[in-house]
Image: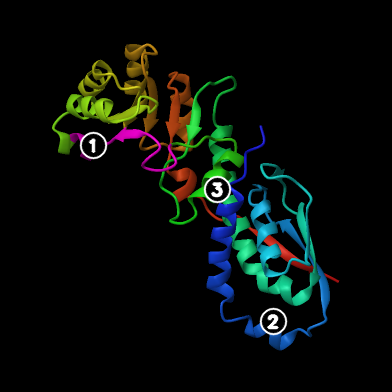
């Protein structure tokens, strides 16, 4: 299924902030070197194999800089591009293209890097596996909507969007509340009936306590593969089980084979490397 793009209002806000950061005082080089009536075209090409993400954002960058520019995406977000493949073209006023270039590339390279990272994790799942790969809230401040969209472009899933999206009881919540049971009981009494309650555990006794207290989702924090397998066998579907902590590409196949429902990793966003996409001028 094609991932839904972020809200136009969100795209506009983030792009305007980025353009203000780069263009609030103009572009000294472009105005010094390029005649005002110069027209031109440029193309975005992959300089390595990647999963593309961010083309609607790039389109908005050019639109805000100069609504007369023509931007054409030749592929859709989520598509695998090989080195040298064409992603998009832009044509029109040369000054406008050059002023928008860096902001457009920053978004496209970063978002495509996250999408490519997510696809690497997805590709490690055994054939037929029902386990979900999910991101976390370990995102770049201000760019969460774009990075989470990029995760979906790569084929992975999103965890809770923000602190209001679900109850997620972590180790410090448990320590402050006094126990797993107390934290879950208070959450169930306070939260709306439509809200899921997740509890992080780092020992098997905590797992047993969270299940008995009625947690809907239990995060197995830094459980090794054998412990995850034992947890799946013990829980028997009575709660959604999520494995997190110390997740590497090498562990994905064996973790999925335990039958765990979700594998979450902050590395989908916080450790994704921007990919190499060039914007090259056409003669």
Q: Residue at x 51, y 50 (%)?
A: 272
Which portion, as a residue range, is magenta? 160-174
Give the CA separation, mark 1 to mark 2: 53 Å
Q: Which mark is residue 131?
A: none
Pointer 3 local density, CA inside 10 Å: few below 14, some 14–19, many at least 20: many
Task: Tell me the residue that label 3 is attached to.
Answer: 114
Q: In what element is the residue under mark 2?
A: helix
The percent position of residue 56, horizontal first and vertical second, equals 67, 52
Side of 117 relative to 281 (left or right): left
The percent position of residue 186, horizontal first and vertical second, equals 21, 28
Q: Nearer the viewer, mark 1 or mark 3?
A: 1
Magenta-colored stretch includes residue 170: yes
Q: In what element is the residue under mark 1?
A: helix
Question: On the rendered image, what quadrant is the C terminus found in?
Answer: bottom right
Magenta-colored stretch includes residue 216: no
Question: Does 246 appear above or below 180?
Answer: below
Q: In front: 218, or 18?
A: 18
Q: Are marks 3 and 2 in contact (CB under 8 Å)?
A: no
Question: Does 72 appear above or below 281?
Answer: above
Q: Are marks 1 and 2 in contact (CB under 8 Å)?
A: no
Q: Quadrant of residue 101?
A: bottom right
Q: Which mark is residue 171?
A: 1
Task: Tell me the residue that label 2 is attached to.
Answer: 30
Q: Residue at x 68, y 52 (%)?
A: 55
- Labels 1 and 2: the sequence-earlier one: 2
Side of 169 relative to 71 (left or right): left
The percent position of residue 120, horizontal first and vertical second, equals 56, 39
Residue 113 seen in render: yes
- Labels 3 and 2: the sequence-earlier one: 2
Side of 202 relative to 144 (left or right): left
């Amino acid at each position: 299924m094609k991932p839904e793009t972020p809200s136009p209002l969100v795209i506009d806000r983030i792009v305007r902030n980025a353009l203000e950061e780069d263009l609030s005082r103009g572009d000294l080089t472009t105005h010094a070197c390029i005649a005002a009536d110069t027209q031109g075209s440029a193309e975005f090409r992959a300089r390595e194999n990647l999963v593309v993400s961010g083309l609607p954002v790039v389109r908005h960058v050019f639109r805000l800089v100069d609504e007369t520019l023509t931007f054409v995406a030749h592929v859709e977000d989520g598509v695998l591009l090989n080195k040298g493949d064409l992603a998009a073209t832009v044509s029109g006023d040369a000054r406008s293209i050059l002023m928008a270039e860096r902001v457009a590339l920053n978004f496209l390279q970063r978002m495509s890097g996250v999408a490519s990272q997510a696809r690497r994790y997805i590709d490690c799942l055994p054939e037929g596996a029902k386990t979900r790969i999910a991101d976390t809230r370990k995102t770049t401040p201000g760019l969460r909507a774009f990075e989470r969209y990029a995760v979906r472009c790569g084929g992975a899933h999103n965890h809770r969007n923000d602190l209001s999206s679900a109850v997620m009881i972590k180790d410090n919540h448990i320590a402050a509340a006094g126990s797993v049971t107390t934290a879950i009981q208070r959450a169930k009494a306070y939260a709306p009936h439509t809200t899921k309650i997740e509890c992080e555990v780092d020992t098997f006794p905590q797992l047993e306590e969270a299940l008995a207290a009625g947690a809907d989702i239990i995060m197995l924090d830094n459980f090794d593969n054998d412990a995850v397998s034992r947890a799946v066998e013990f829980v028997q579907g009575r709660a959604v089980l999520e494995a997190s902590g110390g997740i590497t590409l090498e562990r994905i196949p064996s973790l999925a084979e335990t039958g765990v429902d979700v594998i979450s990793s902050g590395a989908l966003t916080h450790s994704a490397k921007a990919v190499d996409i060039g914007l090259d001028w056409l003669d």
